[in-house]
Amino acid sequence: MHGYHRRENDRLQDQAGTLVDLLHSDTSYPPGSVVLEAGCGVGAQTVTLAQRSPDARFTSFDVSADSVAQAKRTTDAAGIANVQFQQADIFALPFAPESFDHVFICFVLEHLSRPAEALTILNQLLRPGGTMTVIEGDHGSTYFHPDSSAARMAIQCLVELQRLAGGNALIGRQLYPLMVEAGLEAIHVSPRMVYVDSSRPDLVDGFTRKTFTAMIEGVRESAIEAGIIDREAFDAGVRDLHRTAETDGVFCYTFFKGVGEKHKS
Amino acid sequence: MHGYHRRENDRLQDQAGTLVDLLHSDTSYPPGSVVLEAGCGVGAQTVTLAQRSPDARFTSFDVSADSVAQAKRTTDAAGIANVQFQQADIFALPFAPESFDHVFICFVLEHLSRPAEALTILNQLLRPGGTMTVIEGDHGSTYFHPDSSAARMAIQCLVELQRLAGGNALIGRQLYPLMVEAGLEAIHVSPRMVYVDSSRPDLVDGFTRKTFTAMIEGVRESAIEAGIIDREAFDAGVRDLHRTAETDGVFCYTFFKGVGEKHKS
């Protein structure tokens, strides 16, 4: 398990490194704003967020105390001083209503069985007129050339594992209705598509290989143990994913970013 | 058959109307350029092309004389005078090598069994340093909320019919390798994703309902006659596609646009 988590952490760090502009370049908060980052994990997004808004004050929490400790080490190492961390459960938060100007939540809803309820709780923490920013991927947005049913089956393992764990790996496409359900207003959702062909070698390596395919490879043992797939079929799928990183290959994946506003009461 | 074609034509016209900015806003040709439009069909793109480059001279051809006649009526009605039409087969073209500054081809390769060969032929018609612009959809890029296996099966009917007719409905993702194979240089492919939620009612109606779902509905009889699907399953799929156009629905589809250059010899 530790090996898996280590790999997962590296992947998230790599992911934030290569996707940072695509996902975050239009997020910055004014000086003095008080911002809540929900589900900061090991701080992959926290570093970017805090560096892009050096005069905003962040509170970042995660349900895992280990992750919070790691996030603090990561931001300390980066010389970041405008973030305070704490361990907390999104469904039992210790914060006062309307105590934040902005909320940011990235790659968290996919893990929750009640994502709309989580957003509703976070909305209550926003001051009137404050904003909420939500980012999620959608594994069902994945397609590639050469097409391969084996590769699609390997990806489906991750979707199925996420479902068995109570989450939803296809949640990106649902941001708009989820944010409506949470009571947000003036919602704008924009897709952030990662398109990779061999004219973009940084993305071939940084996204197709080291982010997406590495993520699928990371669930190999879990998928086989859960009886979702056999070893040979899984490995064939991973080989075909690597095949899409060759010179004539193409890989497509889409993240979704939604921004909504708390009702100005 | 005539009813089907009529509907298909209306759909293509609607499509060009609602997608025109997404697909064409970055295509315009300098005064005096000589441009070949390959596979103009009924002129859905011709009107846009010619209006955006009023001082370029277009030659637009299609394999169907009926389509060419319709395209001419359409451009005449729009008062367009910088296009000449002719009937021609892309694999037996009457034009001299290197006689065009630019080539434009949109929604054509999906119908061809030898798309790279077609691009190679068109590349020979370009002068050195001239550009080729290629636009295609990709039906495998379609996903939506609520997800529905019935809707995915109905879409798969169109993919299968296209395949049986010698074409490829998943060709959008392949533009980059196809253009490389045709000998083009400095190739840049960009995805053009249509993201539709109920905050964009024009797209809900103009794209989800009247373009994509109408296109699927248009192959109902062909798909049933070909034995790909039964009536009930197809109709369930179409109902679920319409369901994605409701208030909490989301619909995603991606076109691909590639621009490449003829080798400056």
Image (cartoon, coloured by chain):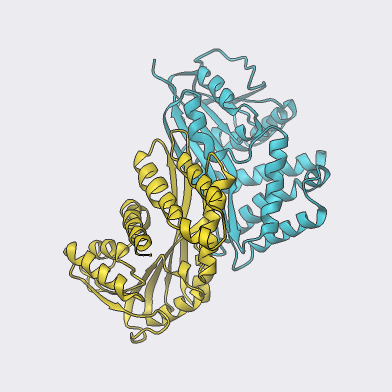
Chain colours: A cyan, B yellow
Question: In the figure, is residue A45 to the left or right of B245?
Answer: right
Q: Foreground: A118 or A132?
A: A118
Q: Quadrant of the N terminus of chain A?
A: top right
List x then y, in percent, for residue A206: 62, 53
Q: Is residue B184 above or below residue A262?
A: below
List x then y, in percent, for residue A29: 46, 30
Q: Foreground: A170 or B240?
A: B240
List x then y, in percent, for residue B143: 53, 47
- Residue sitting at 32 percent across and 54 percent down? B14
- Residue sitting at 72 percent across and 27 percent down? A64
- Residue sitting at 80 percent across and 42 percent down? A226
- Residue sitting at 59 percent across and 68 percent down? A248
List x then y, in percent, for residue B122: 41, 78
Question: In the figure, is residue B47 to the left or right of A209?
Answer: left
> Does residue B59 appear anywhere in the picture?
yes
Question: In the figure, is residue B100 to the left or right of A162?
Answer: left
Q: Foreground: B138 or A217?
A: B138
Q: Foreground: B84 or A125?
A: B84
> Does residue A82 appear anywhere in the picture?
no
